[in-house]
Image: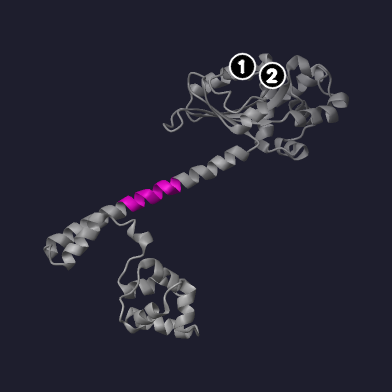
Amino acid sequence: MTFGQRLRELRKAKGLTQRELADRVGLSFTYLSKIENGAMPPPRGKTITDLANALNTDADELFGLAKKVPSQFLEHINPEVIKLIRALRDGKEQPVSGLMRLYQRVAELESELMRARKEQGAKEQMEFFHALIVNSQDAILVLNKEMELLYESPSAARLFGFEGGSLVGRDPLGIVHPDDLSKVANMLQQLAQSPGEIIRLIGRTLAKDGKGRVIEATAHSMVHIPQVNGIVVNLRDITEREQELQEAFGSDRTTLKHKDYKLTASEGQVLIFMAEGLSNPKIAEKLVLSPATVRFHVSNILRKLGVATRTEAVALAIRQHLVEK
């Protein structure tokens, strides 16, 4: 079947006259008639596309009958390949050597196409993760082994009240509360020497306006990963949660002596439940925390009280009136 014959068949199936189809595509009625009758060769690519759209049919079939390649495909075909095909068609190239060269070039193009697709996929994945980071409430900082701040997520600037990008180049310890400088510095130094280690802690920071914030930090040493080669720190602002716990339990269940041991409100409440004999899972259930967070609080309590076991911690807390029994 020729291009013109198929065109006539499709037109009649749609119930269109030659004049109606010509008007839709913007062609001369006479020109369209000659195409259908085979008096004129198939039209150029754009006209074939317009005809396919007007007839609501597959353009690839019409292009195949017209022995043409759509323009959007031609722009991706290397000119060298086109020359080889024409040389083979016109007998200017030896079939065997020409085909070998053609196959070789097609293989190269396929390889280039696959590489381009991988790069595009990687780009789209990076854009996806970037969108997640930009819209995350948690802040992300990346430091190198020398404790220089290499990266800050947009939420980090919002958290500390600085303009975006202004934290990079600063001393990261400069935003840490003076009372917590020692433990944060020790944590970072340990991570710089311990690839793969993860440390969690709760500390205080100072925002640009001088107000303190209570931050829950998770720091992951990725110094062994070439693409990172640093320490990735996730920061979550838990100031309001600490205040709520202090208001709910601080006045009637704890004393000011908590401050002597620098226990946070969360740690004070965990210590109360420890004294009541609750297990970590039960404490997690009552405070609506994860078991891992409770274990972290218990570890901090033991360290701050200077004891080795839960029993010793509870005994000291009762003796010092940190909890009421």
**Lateral position of residue 219 relative to residue 11, left or right:** right
Q: Is residue 92 visible?
A: yes
Residue carrying label 1? 174
- How far apart in space, not on screen, are marks 1 and 2 (Cα)? 23 Å
**Residue 103 placement (x, y as % from top left):** 22, 59
For the N terminus, give its image quadrant.
bottom left
Determine whether 70 is above or below 135 in the image.
below
- Residue 3's disc is none
Number of numbered labels in the structure image? 2
* Secondary structure found at label 2: helix
Which of the image's four quarters has the C terminus?
top right
- Between discs 1 and 2, the one toward the N terminus: 1
Q: Residues within 10 Å of mark 2 (few under 14, many from 20)?
A: some
Three-letter residue code for mark 1: Gly
Per the image, label 1 sits on a secondary structure element best described as helix
Residue tagged by mark 2? 304
Q: Amino acid at mark 2?
A: Lys
Q: Main secondary structure of the magenta part?
A: helix
Residue 312 picture quarter = top right
In the image, residue 208 lies at what x, y percent?
68, 20
Colour mapping: one colour
- Residue 193 or 33: which is nearer the viewer? 33
- Which residue appears at 62% of the width and 14% of the height? 182
The residue sitting at 81% across, 27% down in the picture is 246
Vertical side of 43 occupied by 99: above or below: above
Q: Is residue 50 left or right of residue 201?
A: left
User: In which quadrant of the rendered view does residue 63 lie?
Assistant: bottom left
Q: Is residue 274 visible?
A: no
Give the residues in magenta: 112-122
Q: Position of residue 160 (x, y in %)?
A: 66, 25
